[in-house]
Amino acid sequence: MVKFTDSNFDISMSDPAPKSQMLRVPTALIPAVRELSRLHREGHTTPLLQALQDVIAEIDSKNDINFLPTNTDTKHLEEKLDQLETQLKSDRQTLLQKLEKIETAIRTTRNSQNSRNRSNSYNPHHQPTVELEAFPAENLAKRLGLTAATLESEREKLTTAEFISYTRNRDPRSFGWEYRSDGFYHPIGQ
């Protein structure tokens, strides 16, 4: 008994001709479907199905490819595919481990270079602490870009707080300077 199975219906050679159904077909197949429909209406369904089964069997007999699991070629191909998959997984894992090591080395190198650069670079906001000594008027005047006479004149006409602010604005490192009774100008922190 020949049986054609479709998700919508089963056709057996021993069964009577099935009822007609509406099916969508590609435009290129419309003439062939019309011809099949005509043959069906004329009652030639059973011989038509037998002829189709014969054509399918003839096409199958011309193909020597056997996809059954018992075929040794198919088993060999499956084994090869399994080996390749295993090898690819192993290679992928090895590559990921190597990439991880490289990334770690790059990060370590960058961090050590950055820390060296930070310690060697000039950063005006993070200058090393330098203790400034008290200056006589001539030395402080040079530091502030003034003459000793101008420095003395400004100290005499400004209050202590104003003089500290005045010197802070002129000092290259923004230190304020205060005149003390020992005759020297002492630095006031930033």
Image (cartoon, rainbow, N blue to C red):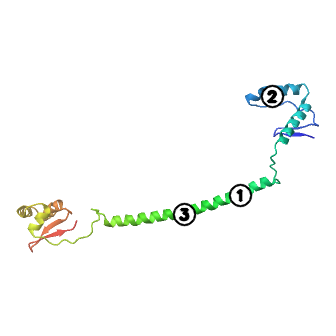
Disc on the earlier residue, 2 or 1 = 2
Amino acid of disc 2: Val
Marks 3 and 1 close (CB-CB < 8 Å)? no
**Is residue 27 depicted above or below 113 in this figure?**
above
Q: Is residue 153 above or below residue 29?
A: below
Viewed as shown, does residue 110 lie left or right of 168?
right
Q: Earlier in the sequence, mark 3 or mark 1?
A: 1
> Which residue is drawn at the image coordinates 49% and 65% (left, top)?
104
Amino acid type, residue under disc 1 in the picture: Asp
The label on residue 133 is none
Circle nearer the viewer, 2 or 1: 1
Regarding mark 3 in the picture, which secondary structure is present there?
helix
Residue 2 % position (x, y): 90, 40
Residue nearer the viewer, 115 or 18: 115
Disc 2 marks which residue?
33
Residue at 80 percent of width and 28 percent of height: 32
- Left or right of 21 in this view: 85: left
> Counting other residues with Cα less than 10 Å from the Cα at mark 3, is it few (<14), some (14-19), or many (20 or more)?
few
The span from disc 2 to disc 1 (Cα, nearest Å) is 44 Å
- Residue beneath disc 3: 98
Seen at 90% across and 35% down, the residue is 50
Above-or-below relation of 85 to 12 = below
Is there CB contact under 8 Å for labels 2 and 3? Answer: no
Does dot 2 land on a helix, a strand or a loop? helix
Considering the image in quadrants, where does the C terminus appear?
Answer: bottom left
* Residue indicated by mark 1: 82
Give the residue at the far right of this rendering. Answer: 14
Q: Earlier in the sequence, mark 2 or mark 3?
A: 2
